[in-house]
Image (cartoon, rainbow, N blue to C red):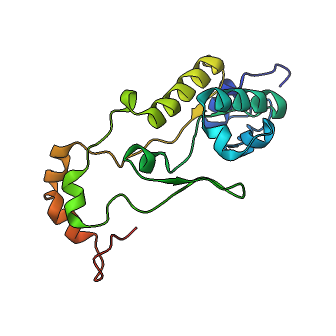
């Protein structure tokens, strides 16, 4: 194979069990972006511009074949009003669970992505990285399934039944 493929062509060729110009390289570097920009993990995730700058720089530097538009897993906890704990040794983690007792489930207000700063930051990073790739590279992101519309709880029972199924003898939620 003498012709160089785009990342997207390379990945699609490999997925169809054909020989590409080289093996696709997927570097899923989320936290490394902070090191790339020489800043703390908390500072790195404080702005979608930092994520975009680091991810595009690493894509060029390492020749990865995918765009990785992942922010941090605890963003859902943050969106629901919970605490995010930032450390320099690892990824941001969720603090105390937002749901402490059964009655908390009834009080949850599910956030709207475009009206919640932390989710909007993640969305802006995804949109910008997608535009940067311009269809030349596949993109990967983290989608959440935690947010359910109120009616969806009722298909398998109501919220109180949901809470009963997911608690331990001590009354705390299981993970």
Q: Quadrant of residue 134?
A: top right
Q: Is residue 17 visible?
A: no
Q: Quadrant of residue 48?
A: top right
Relative height, residue 64 to residue 4 (above, below): below
In this view, the residue farthest toward the bottom is 169
Residue 77: image x %, image y %? 43, 51
Residue 17: image x %, image y %? 64, 38
Residue 74: image x %, image y %? 50, 51
Relative height, residue 125 to residue 88 (above, below): above
Relative height, residue 58 to residue 98 (above, below): above
In this view, the residue farthest toward the right is 2
Q: Residue at coordinates 66% horizontally, 56% vertically from top-left?
A: 87
Residue 163 is left or right of residue 46, and the answer is: left
Q: Quadrant of residue 170?
A: bottom left
Relative height, residue 55 to residue 163 (above, below): above
Q: Is residue 160 visible?
A: yes
Give the quadrant of the C terminus: bottom left
Residue 66 is left or right of residue 174, and the answer is: right
Exactly how many numbered labels are in the figure? 0
Q: In front: 152, or 96?
A: 96
Give the quadrant of the N terminus: top right
Residue 131 is left or right of residue 157, and the answer is: right
Q: Residue at coordinates 52% horizontally, 25% vertically from top-left?
A: 124
Q: Residue at coordinates 58% horizontally, 21% vertically from top-left?
A: 128
Residue 113: image x %, image y %? 38, 32
Residue 44 is left or right of residue 92, and the answer is: right
Q: In front: 53, or 43?
A: 43
Q: Residue at coordinates 80% horizontally, 39% vertically from top-left?
A: 38
């Amino acid at each position: 194979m003498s012709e160089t493929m785009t990342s997207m062509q390379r990945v699609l060729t490999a997925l169809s069990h054909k020989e590409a110009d080289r093996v696709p390289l997927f570097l899923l570097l989320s936290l490394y972006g902070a090191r790339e920009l020489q800043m703390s993990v908390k500072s790195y995730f404080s702005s979608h511009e930092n994520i975009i700058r680091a991810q595009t720089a690493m894509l060029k530097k390492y020749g990865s074949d995918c765009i990785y538009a992942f922010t941090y897993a605890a963003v859902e906890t943050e969106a629901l009003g919970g605490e995010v704990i930032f450390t320099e040794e690892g990824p941001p983690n969720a603090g105390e669970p937002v749901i402490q007792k059964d009655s908390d489930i009834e009080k949850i207000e599910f956030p709207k992505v475009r009206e919640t700063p932390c989710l909007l930051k993640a969305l802006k990073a995804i949109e910008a990285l997608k535009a940067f790739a311009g269809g030349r590279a596949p993109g990967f992101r983290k989608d959440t399934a935690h947010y359910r519309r109120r009616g969806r709880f009722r298909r398998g029972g109501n919220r109180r039944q949901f809470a009963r199924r997911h608690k331990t003898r001590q009354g705390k939620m299981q993970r």
